[in-house]
Amino acid sequence: MNLLQQIEHEHALELAKDIPDFSAGDTVRVGFKVTEGTRTRVQAFEGVVIGRKGGNGIGGSFTVRKISFNEGVERVFPIHSPNIDSITVVRRGRVRRAKLYYLRARRGKSARIAEKTNYRAKPGMSGGRALPAAE
């Protein structure tokens, strides 16, 4: 492990959020903090994950897409953002691509994703994210 990876690993351990195991095609509910004036509240954004970038590292992010009032809305969330309150997996989707950008051009039934029925958590994952051991 080089120095840069070691520093990133230590920084990820400091953040140590409980991030569930999810991938493209899964429907997630992201609770993020919204500041309106002096008040801070948690707002939920529920939609389909159409892609992830950067893995679970410091610079990792994921894109969530939903249809709101017949208009497609996409948001990019950094995984380790302090503004993210919670990430909940609502359902697991069965897809054969890592990036689901083709859903942008689809509407209605053609944009549906089949549900994964035989999901098993990865070894070492207890609902949250397992960090790799430092070498």
Image: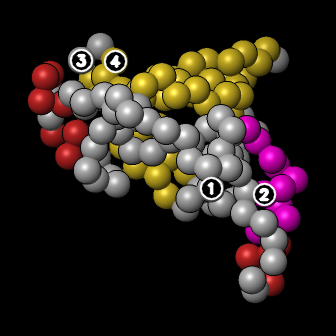
Between the residue at mark 3 and the residue at mark 1, the CA separation in whole angstroms equals 32 Å
Between the residue at mark 2 and the residue at mark 1, the CA separation in whole angstroms equals 9 Å
Q: Mark 3 or mark 2: which comes first in sequence?
A: 2
Q: Which residue is mark 1?
A: 56
What label sits on residue 70 in the rendered view?
A: 3
Q: Going by the image, does 130 lie left or right of 111?
A: right
Q: Mark 2 or mark 4: which comes first in sequence?
A: 2
* In-front residue for pair 11/116: 116
Q: Residues within 10 Å of mark 4 (few under 14, many from 20)?
A: few
Q: Assign the N terminus to one quadrant of the image.
A: bottom right
Q: Which residue is mark 2?
A: 12
At label 4, the amino acid type is: Ser
Tell me the residue at 85%/65% (across/down): 10
On whether residue 5 falls in the magenta region, the answer is no
Q: Mark 3 or mark 1: which comes first in sequence?
A: 1
Asked if disc 2 and disc 1 are in contact, CB closer than 8 Å, the reply is yes
Q: Which residue is mark 4?
A: 68
Tell me the residue at 83%/56% (across/down): 13
Q: Residues within 10 Å of mark 1 (few under 14, many from 20)?
A: some
Q: Going by the image, does 108 lie left or right of 6?
A: left
Q: Residues within 10 Å of mark 2 (few under 14, many from 20)?
A: some
Q: Secondary structure at mark 2?
A: helix
